[in-house]
Image (cartoon, rainbow, N blue to C red):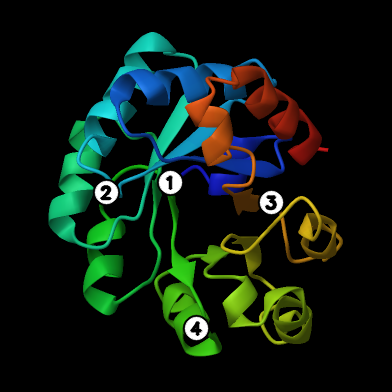
Amino acid sequence: MTSFSSLMGNQILLPIIQADSPTQGVAIAKAMREAGLTLVEVVLRTESSLATLSAIKTEFPDLIVGAGTVTNADILKQALAAGADFIITPAVSEKLLEHLSTCGVPVLPGVSNTGEILLAREFGYQELKLFPAALSGGAKFLAAISSIFQDIKFCPTGGVTAENKADYLSLSNVFAVGGTWVVKKEWLADDNWQAITDACIAGNK
């Protein structure tokens, strides 16, 4: 199975798309693509999320598009049917990890403490999402556990900003950061797609 980090290549920003409609989602994805990004995450938090994921895949077949906020087998099945290239979860359980182990695409399981890290590792995962990162101890937590879980790499999301992303990326056990700061609500309201492109360029440095 391809690792999640190898899907990202040299990309260190995991950009998150939460759109009100497929049309808006495609516009956001286009702005991210114009920033040179090749991988995006569509979070399944709105009624149009699955349709948005499919629309982005149709519009930009070369873009690697995954589904976030996957919490059970039904949502996993729907995400894969919509064309998700990878799966990201906000949390883990034994039941969910069992379903993920046979889903056929790269997975980035979400964890928030040492017990969940150990559970995910027991299922063979060595790349995890720390979520919500800021409320789970942030960069200091990741630094503290680096000697305990030496084989685990993280992509922290939740509370990661343009101002603190360097704190995370400076750590040897962090391979990328995820965040919504590259898509501000006021930019969407103003159709300011260039602002998203510029933020993604800056965020991926």
Coordinates of residue 189 in the picture (x, y in percent): 49, 29
| Residue 149, placed above or below residue 3 | below
62 vs 80, left or right, is right
Task: Choose between 17 and 12: the one closer to the eye.
Answer: 17
First of labels 4, 2 by sequence position: 2
First of labels 4, 1 by sequence position: 1
Coordinates of residue 116 in the picture (x, y in percent): 45, 82
Q: In the rendered image, which quarter is residue 32 located in?
A: top right
Task: Choose between 7 and 137: the one closer to the eye.
Answer: 137
140 vs 156, left or right, is right
> Where is mark 3, residue-wise?
176
**Nearer mark to the viewer, of 3 and 2:** 3
50 vs 172, left or right, is left
Measured Cα–Cα span from mark 4 to mark 2: 21 Å
Q: Which residue is drawn at 26% across and 62% down?
A: 71
Which label is found at residue 106? 1
What is the three-letter code of the residue carrying label 4? Leu
| Mark 2 secondary-structure assignment | loop
